Image: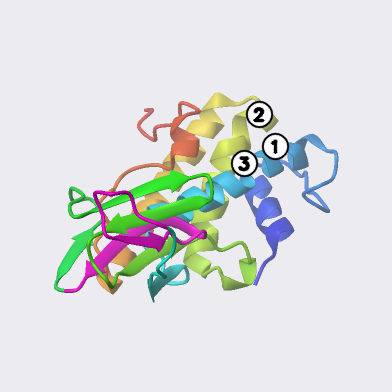
Amino acid sequence: MPGDTDIANMALSRLGTRATIADLAESSTEARQINLWYATVRDELQSLVDWNFNRVSQALAASGTPPARWTSSYAYPSDCLRMRRLDFGGASWVAGTPAAGFEIASSGSGTFLYCNEDQVSAVYAQRVTDPARFTPGFILAFVDCLAASVAHAITQKADLAERLARRAQERIERAMADSANEGLAPDELGALPQSLVVRGLDGNTP
């Protein structure tokens, strides 16, 4: 499987230039731009789609002291990018529905889930930084999203950045459709990662 530098160079190849990098930490313009966006785009894409390689299901560990309005406190997973499902005995919460019967809050010592249940299990999107775990579908989507994020800064071509954003959008939609066939239905179909949206690349430019 490709490593971080390979993924960076695959993204650069989408720009239509001959530039490549030997390391994300080098001082070239290409490496600086890729390094600026790499982790943010990776994490947001991992949270946006219910990928099988970063889907974790586990019981939460009791930790901390709940505020007076709750009876139980659980450690919120530190590697959680997005909570997708919580099971409280006979009741469940699924992402996209209103929160009820629990609260997630941060304190000086970490983030906790408070509720009135003595057992809680969770399904969530885990932050995965090891490219060896990435699936081919994720890599292709990541490459397209990363290329769209750095295109204008490297090439100064707004039309290229817009075309790449549309391509990334299409790749995400296909990934979401595949994910829906596997298990949890996505609740944000059609949404570009925020890292692209904030750059004005909404995937709808003619």
Question: Measured from the top left, where is residue 121 in percent x and y?
Answer: 32, 71
- Circle 2 residues within 10 Å: few <14, some 14–19, many ≥20: some
Of 106 and 156, the residue lying toward us? 106
Distance of label 3 from label 1 (alpha carbons)? 7 Å
Asked if residue 149 lies left or right of residue 26, the reply is: left
Give the percent coordinates (x, y) of residue 15: 64, 41
Vertical side of 46 occupied by 16: above or below: above
Residue located farthest toward the front when viewing the structure as drawn: 68
Q: Are marks 3 and 1 in contact (CB under 8 Å)?
A: yes
Q: Quadrant of residue 113?
A: bottom left
Residue at horizontal 60 percent and vertical 26 percent from the top: 157
Toward the viewer: 26 or 14?
Answer: 26
- Determine which residue is flagged by label 2: 153
Image coords of residue 80 (percent x, y):
46, 58
Pick the quarter of the image with the C terminus: top left
Q: Secondary structure at mark 3?
A: helix
Specify which label sits upstream in the sequence, 3 or 2.
Answer: 3
On-image quarter of the N terminus? bottom right
Residue 174 visible at all: no
Instruction: Give, as a single range, the part of the protein colored magenta.
Output: 65-89
Nearer the camera: disc 1 or disc 2: 1
Amino acid, disc 2: Ala
Magenta-colored stretch includes residue 100 = no
Q: Give the percent coordinates (x, y) of residue 10.
A: 65, 54
Residue at 65% of width from left, 57% of height from top?
Answer: 7
Q: Residue at x 67, y 67 (%)?
A: 2
Query: Callout 1, which amino acid?
Result: Gln
Vertical placement of residue 136 versus 173, above or below? below
What residue is shown with label 1? 33
Tell me the amino acid under the disc marked 3.
Trp
Query: Which residue matches tag 3?
Result: 37
